Image (cartoon, grey):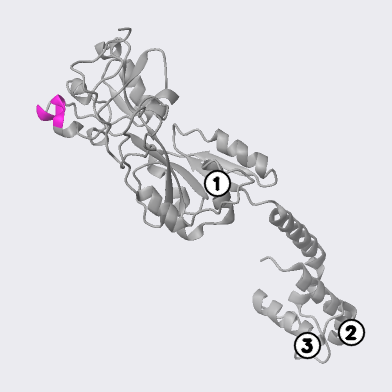
């Protein structure tokens, strides 16, 4: 049992003086306060330190043993208190997590420049754990890939990711610059069929019942290994495919699969000043900006608002044409409009 060093000092004074009034005077505290502290100490220990059946102040055998042990216990208690004080004095870090494919360096660098006195803890997490850290208060914010269960969370969508098919370099599909899902349906998907929208309903291996009943790859690395060996194809967000790029596979955009979205999320009821500051950094707000951070309900409403398709001149050129409407994001989970072409260009043509 750990005893507070101050209580031990008070006990030592009484046990040495064998007089409560003199001990209280030497300690500069009230006698009643000292007596109460000793009674509470005996209660915590579960045995008496003073023999109250004897006249005067007399130690019990247990009381004499505690008096002998007190110097070492006080020293250990002081060391423990000093360590706890040092830990308490350390700055509390700002904690964030991110899923594979998300690069957070530009935002963490900006945070470090603005707040050199507040350390950052940055940790990668698996897709199936992307919001666990936020809900368990292990991190302050998380960069996630949508969709997620949003109950109790605020979210801001940051950007969209193009879906790609990863194929072996020897696969004929590698000669195309871009593909559509129909061109992939005769291939074997190395992932779980339910991971890809429309695959279970349209793929040949599913319709004919020829898909081999094998466990899905445990990781993206394992999936890419299977693709490189010519076993099949993998469908991934572009950033994840780029993260696992290698010379024996290629990645090609899939035009008619829905894009995935990257968002930053945090607990709606715990929007601290630090979280607001970091969100401002992510959204490009400068230190001199007087613009107030939007409230959590407002951010949540914006994240849930549907996107509109890009329209107007220059919509796909990256330049805004004069008089064109401002670009607005597409709705969650919607695919891009397929190009109105009769065929697909091969690489180099």
In the rendering, at what x and y percent does residue 342 appear? Answer: 18, 17
Dot 1 falls on a residue whose secondary structure is: helix
Where residue 79 sits, quadrant-wise, is bottom right
From mark 3 to mark 1, how far is it between C-alphas? Answer: 56 Å
Where residue 231 sits, quadrant-wise, is top left
In the rendering, at what x and y percent does residue 325 appear? Answer: 36, 37
Q: Which mark is residue 280?
A: 1
Residue most extreme to the left: 208
Q: Which residue is mark 2?
A: 22
Residue displayed at 27% across by 34% down: 335
Q: Which residues are magenta?
A: 202-208
In the rendering, at what x and y percent does residue 199 appear? Answer: 20, 31
Left or right for 237, reference 295: left
Q: Is residue 68 above or below residue 148?
A: below
Of the two numbered discs 3 and 2 on the same chain, state the one appearing first in sequence: 2
Q: Is residue 315 above or below residue 306?
A: above
Q: Is residue 337 above or below residue 348?
A: below
Of the residues tagged 1 and 2, which is closer to the observer? 1
Of the residues tagged 3 and 1, which is closer to the observer? 1
Of the residues tagged 3 and 2, which is closer to the observer? 3
């Amino acid at each position: 049992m750990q005893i507070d060093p101050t209580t031990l000092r008070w006990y030592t004074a009484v046990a040495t003086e064998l007089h409560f009034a003199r001990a209280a005077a030497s300690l500069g505290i009230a006698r009643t306060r000292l007596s109460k502290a000793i009674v509470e100490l005996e209660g915590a220990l579960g045995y008496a330190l003073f023999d109250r059946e004897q006249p005067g102040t007399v130690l019990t055998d247990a009381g004499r043993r505690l008096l002998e042990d007190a110097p070492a216990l006080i020293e250990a208690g002081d060391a423990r208190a000093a360590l706890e004080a040092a830990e308490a004095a350390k700055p509390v870090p700002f904690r964030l997590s991110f899923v594979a494919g998300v690069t957070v360096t530009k935002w963490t660098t900006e945070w470090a420049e603005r707040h050199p006195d507040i350390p950052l803890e940055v940790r990668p997490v698996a897709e199936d754990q992307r919001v666990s850290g936020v809900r368990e208060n292990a991190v302050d914010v998380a960069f996630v890939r949508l969709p997620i269960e949003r109950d109790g969370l605020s979210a801001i969508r940051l950007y969209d990711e193009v879906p790609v098919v990863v194929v072996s370099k020897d696969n004929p599909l590698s000669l195309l610059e871009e593909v559509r899902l129909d061109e992939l349906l005769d291939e074997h998907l190395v992932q779980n069929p339910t991971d890809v929208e429309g695959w279970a309903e349209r793929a040949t291996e599913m319709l004919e019942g020829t898909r081999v009943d094998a466990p899905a790859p445990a990781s993206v690395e394992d999936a890419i290994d299977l693709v490189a060996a010519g076993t099949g194809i993998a469908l991934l967000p572009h950033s994840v495919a780029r993260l696992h790029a290698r010379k024996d596979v290629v990645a090609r955009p899939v035009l008619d699969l829905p894009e995935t979205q990257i968002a930053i999320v945090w607990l709606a009821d715990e929007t601290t000043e630090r979280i607001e500051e970091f969100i401002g950094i992510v959204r490009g707000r400068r230190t001199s900006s007087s613009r107030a951070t939007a409230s959590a309900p407002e951010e949540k409403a914006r994240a849930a608002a549907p996107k509109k398709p890009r329209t107007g001149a220059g919509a796909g050129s990256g330049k805004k044409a004069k008089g064109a409407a401002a670009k607005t994001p597409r709705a969650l989970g919607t695919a891009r409009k397929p190009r109105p072409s009769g065929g697909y260009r091969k690489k180099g043509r």
